[in-house]
Image (cartoon, rainbow, N blue to C red):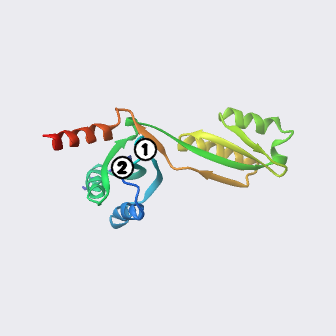
Amino acid sequence: MTMEKKKQEYTITVFTENLTGLLQRVVTVFTRRHINIDSLTTSSSSDESIYRFTIVVQVEESQIHKLVAAIEKQVDVIKAFFYETHEIVHQELALYKIPTAVFMGDDETEELVRSHNARILSIEPDYIVVEKTGYKEETEALLKDLKKKGIYEFVRSGRVAIPKPMEPLNKYLASVESVFEQ
């Protein structure tokens, strides 16, 4: 009897220089291994010279170590880290465009938006834009409820995450600097 290996959600944080083509090289590491990226967010980091990728994947524990090592082999990648969900603080942002007619004069829809801790960003003659920040499950729950009322558009950002431990990049950079100082 063979035991099927269990896939788990990991959040990978990759710190790089901000160079053209680097995103493609990082994504190619996943493509070559036939690993689907569930979420990808890029931004500057606390150091303006360093860029940050936040990538969410579902892989087996044995794969995550190899994946991060392969990412770190890319030229211009400074360091990569991976985290299980309990090791990070994370959120996503979702926007919903709903018909104004559904919302106006309907206390139930207004209560629905409030019950999901969402807020109205814009009221236009034809539509209203609602914003929800939270976990993917929370933004999906509001989407499901709004679909019952009517919805024009929906978009969700990728995961934005920071590790619960102190930023490991700073520790890594300090350790590298101390090696060069010796």
Residue placed at 32% from the left, 49% from the top?
A: 80
Q: Residue furthest right?
A: 105
Q: Which residue is mark 1?
A: 45
The image quadrant that residue 176 belongs to is top left
Q: Residue at x 49, y 46 (%)?
A: 159
Give the vertical position of 74 relative to 147 (above or below): below
Residue type at tag 1: Ser
For this rendering, which residue is in front, 138 or 87? 87
Give the residue drawn at x 62%, y 52%: 155
Secondary element type, mark 1 = loop
Q: Earlier in the sequence, mark 1 or mark 2?
A: 2
Disc 2 target residue = 15
CA–CA distance in space, label 1 to label 2: 8 Å
Q: Give SS at disc 2.
A: strand
Categorize mark 1 by other alpha carbons within 10 Å: few (<14), some (14-19), many (20+): few
- Identified by mark 2, the residue type is Phe
